[in-house]
Image: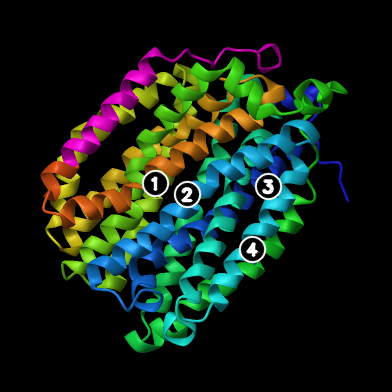
């Protein structure tokens, strides 16, 4: 049942903390926290649990690679989810999509917590794991775009960069919760943790989803979408129109978004696994990773606010330049195999990631008109997620395993970031655009 949480024209001229707008922002944030808790939970488990539970019949290196392959498969599901749910979000509205994605994410995450190990059912276990991961990817692929647009399209124009960031801010907050829950479970003896302890955080997702659904059902539809009225027939297949009429905007959006997502792939999964393999204590590393998520959250808030004053491109470019400078220091710190080196690498690296993430939601949304905004922005962000976060741990592990080492990994990463910087500089600025006129 839909409540009266909607923002009138007068409300939108006031502060973001006006009653109705505040509830919308909290809905966007809390829903994304839950979705990304579920998604990041898998990322961390892929680094410290799944090689031992689902791929224990392989060598340690191959088990890690196989686990990261399942991680990448989930990220491939994200652009698929962005296209599927973007289609319905642009044709039927944002709210219904948000409810559906949360339910799908909750069910698939709970199912992972109930999966039998390979030692019990053989090859069926990793097959079921991949299936659940794909469903997770599809769900989170639809979540981000809807949560972001509900906030952005209700907000006053001068503050929409900060408002749109609330969907992105849910990612580090969810990551903190996921990392903390796995860290707590990992304090169990090794055999108990790998037998049943790791499952508890996945099953806990059910309670979070119930809370999220209670919040989400109270939010009404985006006013900009409502203003389109009966134009649904003009957008029968939004993805085709995006690719036909806005291909350059989509290409630029994907390229810019990849920048911060490569940092995510290194810091959230590869660095955790690599540090533990080099001898660092697993629980200590997971606890330190929480501080990386805090740094990301703080930086994203700062840069999102700055983007409403200086535009989206300046903080984006500044963050990418900082990432280029920090590539080799970050990799060398991780390579020390110490808790201190890991902490310095991940905290600074994720602060830089957050500085890029803050303005990114508004930047992507302002590339597309309202009738295609859900599909276009989701396509950009989720495709970048697949290419950046999804394949980076696999590529990094493979480069190091075949003898390329940190040096080759660093130069490849810098090359990708350089391309992202060029895309940022040639993209148009959208801060002052009228969203209804795009």
> Could you give the CA–CA distance between mark 3 and mark 1, rounded to whole angstroms?
25 Å
Q: Residues within 10 Å of mark 4 (few under 14, many from 20)?
A: many
Start and end of the magenta stretch?
410-438
Tell me the element at label 1.
helix
Q: Residue furthest front?
A: 123
Residue underneath mark 2: 75
> Could you give the CA–CA distance between mark 1 and mark 2, rounded to whole angstroms?
7 Å
Contact, mark 3 vs mark 4 (Cβ under 8 Å): no
- Point out the tag, 3 or 1, that comes first from the N-terminus: 3
Eyeballing the image, is 215 above or below 416?
Answer: below
Residue ID at (35%, 49%):
265
User: Image quadrant for the C terminus?
Assistant: top right
Percent x, y of residue 16:
65, 32
Residue underneath mark 4: 106
Percent x, y of residue 264:
36, 47
Nearest the eye: 118 or 213: 118
Residue ID at (71%, 64%):
210
- Point out the tag, 3 or 2, that comes first from the N-terminus: 3
Disc 3 versus disc 4: nearer the observer: 4
Q: Which mark is residue 27?
A: 3
> Could you give the CA–CA distance between mark 3 and mark 4, rounded to whole angstroms?
17 Å
- Point out the tag, 1 or 4, that comes first from the N-terminus: 4
Contact, mark 1 vs mark 2 (Cβ under 8 Å): yes
Residue underneath mark 1: 389
Q: Residues within 10 Å of mark 3 (few under 14, many from 20)?
A: many
Tell me the element at label 4.
helix
């Amino acid at each position: 049942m839909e409540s009266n949480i909607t923002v009138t024209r007068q409300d939108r001229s006031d502060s973001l903390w006006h009653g109705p707008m505040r509830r919308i922002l909290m809905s966007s944030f809390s829903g994304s926290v839950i979705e990304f808790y579920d998604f990041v939970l898998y990322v961390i488990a892929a680094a410290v649990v799944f090689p031992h539970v689902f791929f224990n019949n392989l060598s340690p290196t191959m088990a890690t690679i196989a686990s990261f392959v399942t991680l990448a498969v989930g990220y491939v599901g994200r652009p698929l989810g962005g296209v599927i749910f973007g289609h319905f979000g642009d044709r039927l509205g944002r709210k219904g999509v948000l409810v559906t994605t949360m339910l799908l994410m909750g069910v698939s995450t709970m199912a992972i917590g109930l999966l039998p190990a390979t030692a019990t059912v053989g090859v069926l276990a990793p097959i079921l794991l991949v299936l659940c991961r794909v469903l997770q990817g599809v769900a989170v692929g639809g979540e981000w775009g809807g949560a972001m647009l509900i906030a952005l399209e209700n907000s006053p124009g001068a503050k929409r960069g900060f408002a749109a960031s609330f969907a992105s801010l849910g990612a580090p907050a969810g990551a903190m919760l996921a990392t903390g829950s796995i860290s707590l479970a990992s304090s169990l003896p090794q055999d108990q943790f790998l037998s049943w302890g790791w499952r508890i955080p996945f099953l806990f997702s059910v309670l979070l989803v119930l809370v999220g659904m209670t919040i989400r059902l109270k939010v009404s539809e985006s006013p900009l979408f409502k203003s389109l009225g009966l134009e649904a027939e003009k957008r029968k297949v939004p993805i085709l129109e995006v690719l036909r009429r806005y291909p350059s905007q989509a290409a630029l959006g994907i390229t810019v978004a990849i920048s911060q997502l490569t940092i995510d792939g290194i810091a959230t999964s590869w660095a955790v696994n690599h540090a533990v393999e080099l001898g660092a204590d697993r629980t200590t590393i997971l606890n330190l990773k929480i501080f990386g998520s805090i740094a990301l959250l703080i930086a994203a808030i700062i840069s999102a606010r700055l983007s409403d004053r200086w535009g989206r491109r300046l903080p984006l470019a500044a963050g990418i330049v900082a990432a280029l400078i920090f590539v080799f220091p970050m990799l060398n710190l991780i390579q020390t195999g110490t808790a201190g080196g890991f902490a310095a690498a991940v905290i600074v690296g994720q602060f830089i990631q957050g500085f890029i993430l803050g303005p990114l939601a508004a930047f992507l949304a302002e590339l597309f008109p309202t009738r295609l905004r859900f599909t276009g922005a989701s396509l950009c962000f989720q495709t970048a997620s697949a290419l950046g976060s999804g394949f980076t741990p696999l590529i990094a592990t493979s480069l190091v395993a075949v003898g390329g080492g940190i040096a080759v990994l660093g130069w490849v990463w810098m090359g990708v970031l350089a391309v992202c910087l060029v895309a940022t500089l040639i993209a148009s600025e959208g801060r002052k655009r009228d969203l209804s006129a795009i």
